[in-house]
Image: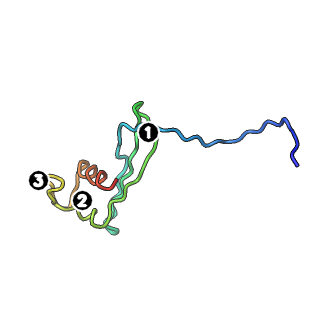
Amino acid sequence: MIRNVGEKIRISKYVEVEEIVTKQKIVSIVVKPEMNSVEVSISLINNQDESVAGKVINISGDDYDLLFSDANYFGDDKQAGTFKEADLWKMIDKLT
């Protein structure tokens, strides 16, 4: 059975909107050598320079080994055992 009422209540509604991401910013890098992984947190930024979302990329296994190698994949001057921000972006693009 249904009855008519005029009661006002407050509810939360989930609204999904589409945003155009124009920039990405690395906000944290966590190197876990004991687990052979690098966790990279990225902020996704719209054209108003607002951070609208974030994502985490985990570089592990063969990709971790590649990141710390001296492979020409990153350019001729890449040194083994280290990485630069440009190397991280290259790996992020490879994984996403």
Give me the disc on residue 76.
3
| Whole-percent x, y for residue 78 in the image | 15, 55
Residue for point 58% across, 40% down: 15
Q: Is disc 1 placed on a helix, strand or loop?
A: strand
Instruction: Give the residue at x 46% y 40%.
Output: 52
Per the rendering, the mark at residue 67 is: 2
Question: In the figure, 47 relative to 54: above or below?
Answer: above
- Image check: 56 left or right of 16? left
Q: Amino acid at mark 3?
A: Asp
Residue type at numbered disc 2: Leu
Q: In the orientation shown, which residue stands out farthest toward the left?
A: 76
Number of callouts in the render? 3
What's the colour scheme? rainbow
Q: Residue furthest front?
A: 1
Q: Residue at x 28, y 49 (%)?
A: 89
Q: Secondary structure at mark 3?
A: loop
**Residue designated by label 1:** 51
Instruction: Give the mark nearer the N terminus: 1 vs 3.
Output: 1
- 74 with respect to 28 (left or right): left
Q: Nearer the viewer, residue 68 or 16?
A: 16
Q: Are marks 2 and 1 in contact (CB under 8 Å)?
A: no
Q: Give the spatial CA distance, label 3 vs label 2.
A: 14 Å
